[in-house]
């Protein structure tokens, strides 16, 4: 599938129950040949209303976090594990993630990023390892098929608990370091 076909398939998707309550499918935003991809969990209220990922309070913080390492919505790509809002912002269920993640994999295949940053536990356990422990393993790296992957705390977690912010600052610097190593 090319971008247009993929986006059309997503906008008409009825693979899981989230299609019944969504306002908009939140496909993704950013540069379609980005070196760095950020992947969150699923749209919240503002994202559902606007059809754009990370535009609520957590999104503002994500923009600030990215800017620390000279990244933004024009030079990176931002997407989620599920493209439709789970009601009342509950975690996306296993079946919902399984139904949706193939769209994300196709986005990754089209973008061919060099670095994937998982935002929070849901993305890390889905994309890195089912038993990934975000509290212990944030900021660690694995390489898979030539793509470097890491996970950092979700910006919503950093809004709830500011004591996690210094660790995340260190993790962001590690991302910048990895970009330098890869000449990005
Ligand atoms: N939280 C997420 O994980 N994704 C969004 O797009 C917004 C908030």
Image (cartoon, rainbow, N blue to C red):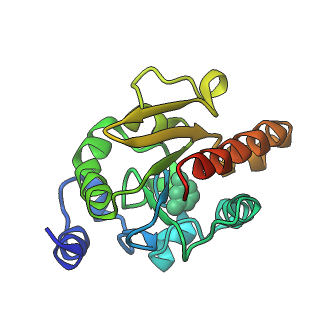
**Viewer-closest of 82 and 117:** 117
Q: Quadrant of residue 162?
A: top right
Q: Nearer the viewer, residue 101 or 117?
A: 117
Indicate the quadrant where residue 104 lies.
bottom left
In the image, taking residue 71 as reference, residue 41 lies left or right, namely: left
Image quarter where the N terminus lies is: bottom left
Count the numbered circles shown: 0
Residue at (37% x, 61% y) in the render: 84
Q: Measuring from the top left, give residue 75's x and y in whole percent.
A: 54, 72
Q: Is residue 160 left or right of residue 112?
A: right
- The residue lying at 23 percent from left, 50 percent from top is 102
Q: Is residue 115 above or below residue 21?
A: above
Give the residue at x 37% y 53%. Answer: 82
Q: Quadrant of residue 10?
A: bottom left
Q: Quadrant of the C terminus?
A: bottom right
* Ligand 1 falls in quadrant: bottom right
Q: Identify the residue shown where x is 25% and y is 74%.
A: 7
Residue 171, image x, y percentages: 70, 40
Q: Is residue 5 left or right of residue 145?
A: left
Q: Nearer the viewer, residue 120 or 68?
A: 68
* Above or below: residue 98 compared with residue 111: above
Q: Tell me: residue 65, above or below residue 171.
A: below
Please state which of residues 47 and 6 is positioned toward the viewer in this rendering: 6
In the rendering, at what x and y percent does residue 57 appear?
70, 64
Q: Position of residue 26 (x, y in %)?
A: 40, 69
């Amino acid at each position: 599938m090319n971008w247009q076909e993929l986006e059309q398939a997503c906008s008409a998707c009825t693979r899981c129950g989230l299609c019944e309550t969504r306002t908009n499918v939140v496909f993704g935003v950013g540069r379609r040949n980005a070196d760095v991809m950020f992947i969150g969990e699923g749209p919240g209220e503002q994202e559902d209303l606007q059809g754009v990922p990370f535009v609520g309070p957590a999104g503002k913080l994500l923009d600030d976090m990215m800017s620390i390492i000279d990244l933004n919505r024009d030079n990176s790509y931002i997407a989620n594990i599920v493209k439709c809002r789970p009601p009342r912002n509950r975690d996306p269920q296993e079946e919902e993630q399984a139904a949706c993640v193939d769209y994300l994999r196709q986005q990754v295949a089209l973008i061919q990023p060099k670095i994937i940053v998982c935002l929070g536990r849901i993305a890390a356990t889905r994309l890195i390892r089912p038993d990934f422990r975000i509290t212990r393993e944030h900021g660690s790296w694995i390489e898979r098929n030539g793509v470097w992957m890491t996970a950092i705390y979700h910006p919503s977690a950093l809004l709830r608990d500011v004591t996690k912010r210094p660790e995340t600052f260190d993790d962001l610097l590690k991302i910048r370091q990895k970009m330098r190593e890869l000449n990005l």
